[in-house]
Image: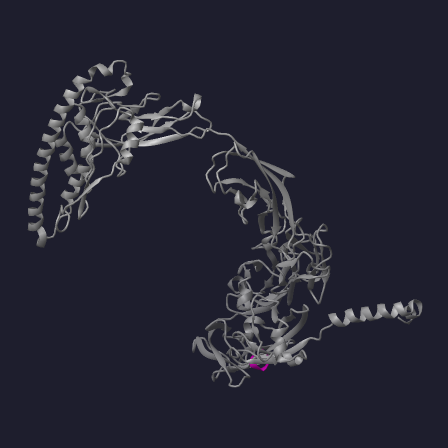
Amino acid sequence: MATLLRFHGFRGQILLCFILGILLESYVAQIRYSVTEEKEKGSFVGDIATDLELQPQEISERGARIVSRGKTQHFVLNSRNGSLIIADRIDREELCPGAPRCFLNFDILLEDKANIYGVDVEIIDINDNKPYFQTEEVEVKVSEIATPGMRFPLPEAFDSDTGVNSVQSYQLSPNHHFSLHVQRGPDGAKYPELVLEQALDREEESIHHLILGASDGGDPVLSGTTRIRVTVLDFNDNAPVFTQSVYSVNVPESVPVRTLLLTVTATDSDEGVNGQVTYSFRKITERTAKIFQMNTVTGEISTLKNLDYEESALYEMEVQAEDSPGLLGKAKVLVSVLDVNDNVPEVSITSLTKSVSEDSLPGTVIALLNVHDRDSGENGRVKCSIPENLPFKLVKSYGNYHKLITVGVLDREKVSQYNVTVTATDWGTPPLSIDTSISLNVVDTNDNPPTFSQASYSVYIQENNPRGASVYSIIARDPDSEENSRITYSIAEDILQEAPLSSYISINSNTGVIYALCSFDYEQLHNIQLLVIAQDAGDPPLSSNVSLTLFILDQNDNAPQILYPIFPTDSITGVELAPRSAEPGYLVTKVVAVDGDTGQNSWLSYHLLKATEPSLFSVGLHTGEIRTARVFLSKDTFKQNLVVSVTDNGEPPLSATVSVTVVVADSILEVLSDLNQLTDPEIPSESSLTFCLVLAVTAVSCLFFGFIIVLLALRIRKWRASKLLRLRTRHFVGVPVSEFVGIDGVRAFLQTHTQEVTLTMHSQKNQTLFPQQACADTLICQKMCEKNRPLLASQNLLEGKEDSNILQVRSLLHLLPNLTCHYSLL
């Protein structure tokens, strides 16, 4: 270091200070606490704020939180007073079974500067588990020739607690033949043995029952018992002897289930039944008994479950060999589990920034990662990497933590989102790796103005356009996002034909749709030039403009006019009558239309757009004649509504539509009958049933007398019309056949004199219209009819509540004027 300072001078001192700063920043003292197990939730563990030299309020201000190294969070941080408290019940025996000391490790992260502090909490054992034996009763076989002083192994008691809280002493129930001796092993474990004090006589007593107790050294003292059943056997003077006192084997943790690990062998010098040996586990924990199994005949020990080095690297158990008379021999078995690279590294994201501004400086911290591998040695060493083509890099931090920081300039318009794949690979053979994806959104800044797709635009619009119609939609693009890409459109103010341009054209500031504020006339104005400005909503805003020329085109601007049927002033469509006996091809009526245009723009075609029964009627393409396409069926409704379209041959074509109502009936009486069947009146209540019946009878009587009067008037009009027709017969010479319509098989000229009667059934008034006689020229007649003024006569038609039958009569009265016109042609 001194050489470095002498060599570099002042620059060396600066470099030394920089290195010392990095070392001091990464060094963090380990914080240690201790707490007893089984404490209540919320119990105090330690003062984190004081130990970190922080004020209590700084705990929340600096974003302090616990980063657990395990799957379970045992502690929480009180942000109000900066203390560490217990989050849930802690069971030492569950966390560290059989371990002399038990520690829980976790880290405390200060998010403001991404600093990590390690914390170790020692869990102190309490006497919360009593000693227990694996079996409730144990059988010990003793030969009757056994000499006093012979010892017989007894089962060992287990206690999940450690230290003084584990098994400390054994007791045997008082008896004359046996005593208890406790032998201490090299590892400090206590092994109880049954000592024969007096010779046994099988003929005198073949079975002895004893109680073996075990006590721990806790406060209070806890104990457990098991029953000893001593069976007195006949003479057997040799016990089985194992070939080795200790059997050991090394096995990799990757061996499959039911793999043979080793075979223990014991011999018995006796012959026959006394020399037959069976093998079994003598001292084994419940957890170990679920992993290994022994063949009682061959002494083979194999696996029942997969081994895991990370759970236990060494398994220790005792086996025994027993001959038929009951003499025992014992040996120890050690199974060492060798680590293999079978655990994939684990990457946990401790802190993550989901978005970063595109103008962020290099070195901005994006995420803090914790990398861990459950394997040991080289298998547990992990290296991390990310793809090289990204503007990020990984920097190693405290312990197993890594920081992901920016190293280049970000451009949201090029890449708006990064999916950074962090690859963690261990040093095992073969190496194992895992990929963790981190999604990062780049926040936009307003660094791009709006742009148009073309340098200029040309738009064409037909003359006589409707006011307010959209002319064109101009769109500018801004690669920025959100408010920076929200574009508003405007038109530069100008003067056109001594009027402001804004009186001709407007633009929707949000969508860029251009609207025509007036109807253009090609003969007066051929084109309009304007400048469209697009401006974003960034801070500061950016803008651009483009020129647009609007060309006005000439068009076919006269639509067809329908002369017949003519809409009455009360908007009720005409009604045509067709008999049910009409054959296919029967002429029902004719639609007459003209077009003010010339040439091909005045060529008209007729189409049936809509019909109650589309297959019942057809319309002549060029004549406009409505004829029946088939015979009427009983299921056909008596009222058929048709919509006929008249289209010219202009470009674009113009059209008009007319609605025609055809009543299928042979007489007016049938029309009345069908009309009554259409309406299904509501059933009156019992209280007003009599009144409704009387009112219905009265209405039907009035309708009948009214019908007789109308029929008489029609007959008189028919008689007068026939006289006028005979006088004017000579005037019909040269009239085209298409100018006639057929009613009940009689052809009559369309332009005849008619009388029109319109009744409006209001609650207080009716209206009677007596127009002038129809003229020979239909267009002139239409103008004259528009000048007629209706004659009003006030009259009370109905008193009280209207009935459904009266409403049917009103509907029929609306149809009578047209029916009158048809009968006048007869």
212 vs 243, left or right, is left
Q: Relative to 284, say whether 448 is above or below.
A: above
Quarter where residue 207 is shown? bottom left
Q: Is residue 141 left or right of residue 749?
A: right
The reply to whether residue 664 is in sight is: no
Is residue 164 highlighted in magenta?
Answer: yes
Q: Nearer the viewer, residue 683 or 251?
A: 683
Q: Looking at this view, name the residue that lies furthest to the right.
A: 6
Magenta span main SS? helix
Percent x, y for residue 586?
A: 23, 21
Residue 180 inside the magenta-drawn segment: no
Residue range highlighted in magenta: 162-166
**In this view, which residue lies farthest toward the bottom?**
219
Image coordinates of residue 262 in percent, x first then y, are 62, 59
Res 253 visible = yes
Question: Number of labelled discs?
Answer: 0
Residue 592: image location, x then y, percent: 31, 25
Position of 605 relative to 534 (above/below)? above
**Along the viewing direction, whichever of 377 and 339 lies nearer the viewer:** 377
